[in-house]
Amino acid sequence: MNALRAPFRHCPACARGSVCVDTRVFLCEHCAFRYYHNVAAAVAAFILHDGALLLTRRAHAPAAGTLDLPGGFVDPAESLEAALARELAEELALAPLPATPRYLFSVPNVYEYAGVTYATADAFFVLDCVTRPALAALDDVSETLWRPLAEIDLAEIGLDSAREALRRFRGS
């Protein structure tokens, strides 16, 4: 896992340039301002139908062009389940959800975006769909694909946590 980098170069309190980094705590050596860069929550879904898994192709960085599971970050004051429903609607026009999501497990991750390194806890859910849902590639998804679970090449999965989650899901 990559080491966290300060999300800023100057102290937000005194504007001086020296900020001490200690794993997740950023401490200004001049005014003692403390900032805790806590873990961000994210969600993703294993959407299954007739032995096939829904994969998305990432439209933007990080890992643009690679395969992924649909999902995204949890907004403030939002539950994991609400975030999952919102992300699936935003990315796939999947509303209402075609099945009840069931929590599986979480995987720690490091997400690099716009020069900031975010430590995340990615929560994975499964949706077993009786009928194949109608989908649209929206937001940061360029394409949707259905693949038999056993035929998915882990090297095509762009993000470490999604790759690890798929490995664990196939092994269960």
Image: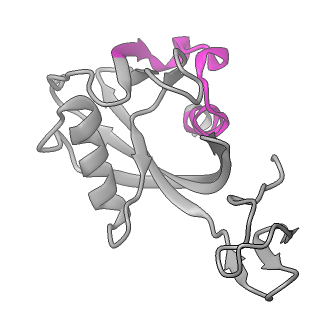
Residue 65 percent location from the top left of the image: 52, 14
* Residue at 65% in and 74% down: 12
In-front residue for pair 97/48:
97
Whether residue 157 appears in magenta in the rendering, the answer is yes
Q: Quadrant of the C terminus?
A: top right
**Does residue 163 appear left or right of residue 133 in this picture?**
right
* Residue at 68% in and 77% down: 35
Can residue 45 be seen here? The reply is no
Compared to 17, does 111 lie above or below? above
* Residue at 20% in and 43% down: 99
**Does residue 171 appear left or right of residue 97 in this picture?**
right
Name of the residue lying farthest toward the front: 15
* Residue at 30% in and 31% down: 139
**Does residue 166 appear left or right of residue 56 in this picture?**
right
In-front residue for pair 168/12:
12
Residue 112 percent location from the top left of the image: 65, 41
Residue 25 percent location from the top left of the image: 77, 75
Compared to 130, does 38 lie above or below? below
Magenta-highlighted residues: 143-169
Q: How is the image coloured?
A: one colour
Residue 46 percent location from the top left of the image: 41, 36
